[in-house]
Amino acid sequence: MIKSILDRLNQPFPSKKSLRGSLLNLFYVSIFIAGFLFIFRPFGMRQAPNPFVISAAFGAVSLIFSVSFELFCRFGLRIKTDIPSWTLWKWLVQSFLVVSWIAFGNHLLQSLLFWGHFGSLNQWLAVWQATLTLGCFPIFVSGLVVQMRAVTNNVQQANDIDLPSEQKSSGPVIEFSLNANESFSVVAADLLYVEAMQNYVQLHVRGGNKISRQMIRITIANTLRQIHELGVTNIVRCHRSYLVNLDAIDTVKGNAQGLRLELNDALDVFVPVSRSYIPEFKRALKLANRAAAL
């Protein structure tokens, strides 16, 4: 039982939507909170004057503080949520922190509305407990539902994918500049995948029975452009931070964040396909299969 719970918590969690989608979702949540407070009036709100105004105020606080937390995580901390290491337990920790931040906003609002003492620890703890009571259970349940739904959908997509039956020939040699006097050359068929690392990319290259790695100062977009200019079409983008050689894929599996590619020459190495790139990835596979059938 405990092991299954831990396994679930360590499973990848679906990455966040676009900023616009996230903000819209937070707006809907704040409307739900305001409506819930107005209809059920928990925590002594039945004795409060103007329940509609108070409920709307707490809903507005939830929106303002959750939006500020979202913007801070995205642009301040630059937290990446579209990588395999973004798991359910990390999402739960982040959710706990945002609920605590909203609780602080609720404490400020309560102090303004009811002339409480801002410095009262007991008052802060009471508001924090009430906010967690209202928010944590729905958050936990919704997180499990979102994760399981994403896994089911992506596993189905993985099962529908047909990998190229035959590998292409070695292909042209791709030459990357290291500096003014040096370059690095790799045969297209030996380039397994490319991983972006800020202003650099790391090439993962097949070399006999092992994989070698080469760091190059270039963006992943320019890397793909340079590869395609040579007529190499079987190396495609599958993630914001990854390119993959279609001929190097051994199996395709689905998880909550999208697809996971196991490469036939890279033991214990998995390349992610994010949900936003799945349609493009599937189109590239169809073209590769069509070309192989000719």
Image (cartoon, rainbow, N blue to C red):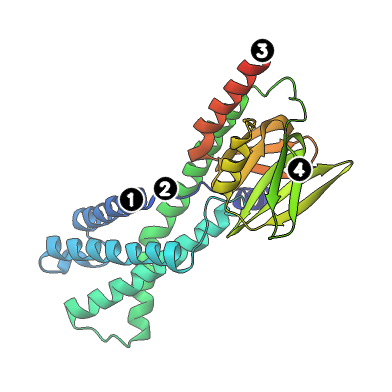
In the depicted view, which residue is nearer to us: 63 or 293?
Answer: 293
Nearer the observer: mark 2 or 4; the answer is 4
Q: Quadrant of residue 63?
A: bottom left
Q: Could you tell me residue 174's position as x and y percent?
A: 70, 41
Q: Secondary structure at mark 3?
A: helix
The reply to whether callout 2 and callout 1 are in contact (CB within 8 Å) is: yes
Q: Secondary structure at mark 1?
A: helix
Give the mark nearest the N terminus, 2 or 4.
2
Residue drawn at the location 56% of the way across and 37% of the way down: 151
CA gap, disc 3 to disc 4?
Answer: 27 Å
The reply to whether callout 3 and callout 4 are in contact (CB within 8 Å) is: no
The residue under label 4 is 186
Nearer the observer: mark 3 or 4; the answer is 4
In the depicted view, which residue is nearer to us: 219 or 252?
Answer: 219
The residue under label 3 is 293
* 98 with respect to 167 (left or right): left
Amino acid at circle 4: Val
Judged from this view, the residue extending furthest toward the right is 209
Question: How many numbered marks are there?
Answer: 4
Q: Mark number for residue 20?
A: 1
Amino acid at circle 2: Lys
Disc 1 packing (10 Å; few <14; some 14–19; many ≥20): few
Q: Mark number for residue 17?
A: 2
Residue drawn at the location 65% of the way across and 11% of the way down: 294
Amino acid at circle 1: Arg
Disc 4 packing (10 Å; few <14; some 14–19; many ≥20): some
